Structures are given as C-alpha cells and as structure tokens.
C-alpha cells in the first residue's frame, strides 16, 4: 500500500508516548517500495503495532495487524463499473506492440575497447553500403553477422518488449519502419538494423480481461477501506505528527 510521504524526521506522538527516528527506521526495513514509501510505511506500521498490540513481541504484533486487516470487508464490484473502467482505460488492456526486424551483429565484448572500435568501423561500412542498396541485406547478414540469425538473413522474427536486451529494445522500438540510419549499440557489439514492420498492439476483448478489471477494482475498494479504518484509528488514538495515509494516484486509477 503506497502512502503519502512526510519529512523523515517528523516526531510521532500518541498521548505522552513519543517514537524516535531509529524505531520507525527499523520498522521501515520490513516494507518494499521507494525510500519515501518505506519511511512512511515504517511510521504507519510502528503506530499500528503500538495501538493493536502494545505489549506484544513482533510476532504477536504481526498477527494482530493481520487479524485487523482480515476484518476489513469490501463489497462486490458490479459489472457496469467493470465495463466502464475497461472503456476508460484502453491502454491498460491492449496487446503488446511487436516489431518484425532483421539485423547484422558486429560482435565485440563490453570491455574490449579496441575490439568495439573495430567492430563499429565494420558496422559503419556495412550500413553505408546498405544505404545505397538495401536489397543485399540478407547476403550481408549471412556474411558478416555474428548472430545465429545470420542463417535466416538476419531475421529475428517478431519481437516484443523483454525478448532481447533492454538497450537494443530502447533503440529500435522508437524507430520508424525501414533501415535505421544509425547503428545500435548493445552489450554484444554493434547492430545494423532494418525494421521490416511494426505491429501495433490491439485492444483486447473485454471477455479476456474482465477478471483482471474486477480484481483491480476490488483492490481499489480495499485500499480505500483500509484508509478509512486507519483514519478512524488515528483519530481515536490521538496520533500526532503523522496524518493518516493516502493511497497514491497510481493505485487508485
């Protein structure tokens, strides 16, 4: 649960009891998220432990928090709400973009400066040649490429995000169809790339994603319920120095 951030040195107080910085920093180590989120969750967790299980050890406090959370009930999400959310968030429910491309790899090890310089020169010569006549791309790939795809004229087929190395994908996914005018560098060396076709992702049918939509909306409801229950606890206990948590926009959208 992401929460709003606060100054890392804010003093938390419940009645006459004060919590020092070291205590909530230890608690923050139990959570995941950004540094600010862990800091704030550490404060929230520390307060919950004190309110729900003031005399217990960590295990007893964990059990008390789990029991408290389990008592929070949420209603069912109706179908109309699910369909409305699906229509309002089309980018979230589309298939991934795919690229059809071929490449020629001039290989060089990452730490081999001399080898990479030589490979770059070879790749630049190859690119200039293909800019004059791209019809010989397959022949050039078969002759020069250090990738197994050389046997297929450099064709990698259809690729999506996560199927190759990040630096290669970051370079090619933003390009227009055709022979790239610049080399692409990766940990493997230098690539001459021809983007054959771009297949844009399509909106998935509602029937294929309705389960995900419903679960996302249920999570939103649960987060809001937790926030309301925390607000009530904060007010009842008289917590000072820390407002009740507010879910991030990313979680509520």
Image: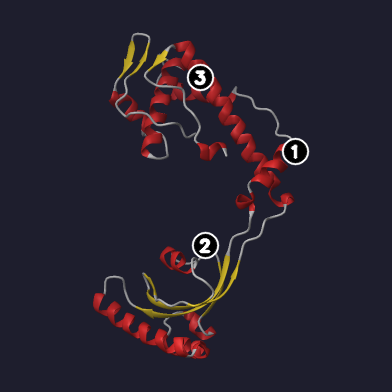
Front position among marks 1 and 3: 1
Residues 43 and 68: in front is 43
Q: Residues within 10 Å of mark 3 (few under 14, many from 20)?
A: some
Dot 1 or dot 3: first in sequence order is 1
Determine whether the residue tagged by mark 2 lies in a helix, strand or loop: loop
Circle 1 sits on which residue?
80
The quarter of the displayed image where residue 202 is located? bottom right
Circle 3 sits on which residue?
231
Determine whether the residue tagged by mark 1 lies in a helix, strand or loop: helix
Q: CA distance from mark 3 to mark 2?
A: 41 Å
Q: Is residue 88 above or below residue 244?
A: below
Q: Is residue 67 visible?
A: no
Dot 2 or dot 1: first in sequence order is 1
Circle 2 sits on which residue?
161
Determine whether the residue tagged by mark 3 lies in a helix, strand or loop: helix
Q: Residues within 10 Å of mark 1 (few under 14, many from 20)?
A: few
Residues 184 and 57: in front is 184
Q: CA distance from mark 2 to mark 1?
A: 33 Å
Q: Position of residue 248 (x, y in %)?
A: 49, 35
């Amino acid at each position: 649960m992401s929460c709003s951030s606060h100054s890392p040195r804010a003093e938390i107080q419940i009645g006459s009891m004060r919590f020092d910085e070291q205590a909530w920093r230890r608690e923050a180590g139990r959570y995941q998220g950004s540094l600010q989120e862990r800091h704030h969750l550490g404060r929230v967790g520390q307060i919950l432990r004190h309110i729900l299980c003031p005399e217990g050890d960590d295990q007893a406090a964990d059990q008390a928090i789990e029991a408290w959370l389990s008592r929070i009930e949420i209603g069912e999400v109706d179908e109309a709400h699910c369909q409305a959310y699906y229509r309002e968030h089309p980018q979230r429910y589309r298939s991934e973009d795919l690229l059809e491309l071929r490449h020629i790899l001039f290989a060089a090890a990452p730490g081999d400066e001399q080898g990479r310089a030589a490979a770059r020169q070879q790749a630049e010569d190859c690119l200039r040649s293909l800019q004059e006549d791209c019809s010989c791309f397959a022949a050039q790939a078969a002759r020069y490429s250090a990738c197994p795809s050389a046997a297929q004229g450099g064709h990698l087929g259809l690729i999506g995000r996560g199927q190759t190395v990040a630096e290669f994908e970051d370079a090619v996914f933003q390009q227009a169809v055709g022979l790239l005018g610049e080399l692409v560098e990766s940990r493997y060396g230098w690539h001459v790339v021809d983007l054959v076709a771009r297949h844009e992702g399509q909106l998935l049918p509602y029937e294929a994603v309705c389960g995900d939509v419903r679960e996302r909306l249920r999570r939103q409801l649960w987060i809001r319920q937790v926030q309301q229950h925390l607000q009530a606890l904060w007010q009842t206990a008289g917590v000072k120095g820390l407002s009740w948590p507010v879910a991030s926009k990313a979680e509520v959208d």
